[in-house]
């Protein structure tokens, strides 16, 4: 999924909710090329947004996704996953 696909082009301003949780937090993540965010789990659903660069997300279910700027990927709770930086990258994690 990419942010640009969430909005219609006919409107001057468009806002779309990415999450409807009442309590949430956002985390900025910076990764250098070749960096690895080692295997871990989250207890709550999360969204990973690639702001700059390129990363590869993988999980124990066999999913592998390359994220480019503007791409969003949902992260399921209690699923082991990891992220590898293919380039210097900036990410936002929302959970």
Image (spheres, rainbow, N blue to C red):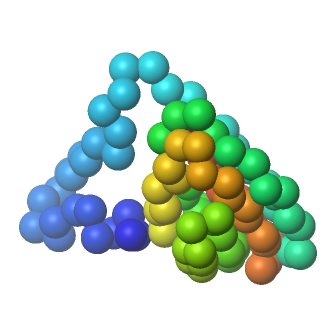
Say which quarter of the image contains residue 31.
bottom right
Left or right placement of residue 26 versus residue 54 in this view: left
- Counting from the top left corner in percent of width and height, residue 13 is at 21, 51
Q: Would residue 18 be visible to someone looking at this image? A: yes
Residue in the picture at 57% in, 67% down: 61
Q: Is residue 18 above or below residue 67?
A: above
Left or right placement of residue 8 versus residue 22 in this view: left
Which residue is most to the left?
Answer: 10
- Counting from the top left corner in percent of width and height, residue 34 is at 89, 75
Which residue is most to the front?
Answer: 61
Which residue is nearer to you in this view: 46 or 50? 46
- Counting labels gives 0
Residue in the picture at 86% in, 64% down: 36
Q: Is residue 86 above or below residue 83?
A: below
Which residue is nearer to you in this view: 18 or 56? 56
Residue in the picture at 28% in, 70% down: 5
Residue in the picture at 56% in, 74% down: 63
Which residue is most to the top?
Answer: 23
Q: Would residue 67 be visible to someone looking at this image? A: no
Which residue is nearer to you in this view: 4 or 38? 38
Say which quarter of the image contains residue 6.
bottom left
State the quadrant of the N terminus. bottom left
- Counting from the top left corner in percent of width and height, residue 93 is at 60, 46
Left or right placement of residue 32 versus residue 49 in this view: right
Q: Is residue 68 above or below residue 29?
A: below
- Counting from the top left corner in percent of width and height, residue 4 is at 33, 69
């Amino acid at each position: 999924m990419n942010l640009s696909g969430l909005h219609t082009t006919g409107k001057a301003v468009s806002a779309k909710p990415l999450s409807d949780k009442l309590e949430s937090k956002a985390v900025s993540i910076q990764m250098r090329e070749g960096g690895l965010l080692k295997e871990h789990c989250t207890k709550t659903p999360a969204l990973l947004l690639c702001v700059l660069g390129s990363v590869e997300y993988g999980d124990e279910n066999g999913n592998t996704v390359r994220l480019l700027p503007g791409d969003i990927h949902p992260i399921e709770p209690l699923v082991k996953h990891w992220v590898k930086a293919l380039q210097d990258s900036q990410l936002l994690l929302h959970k």
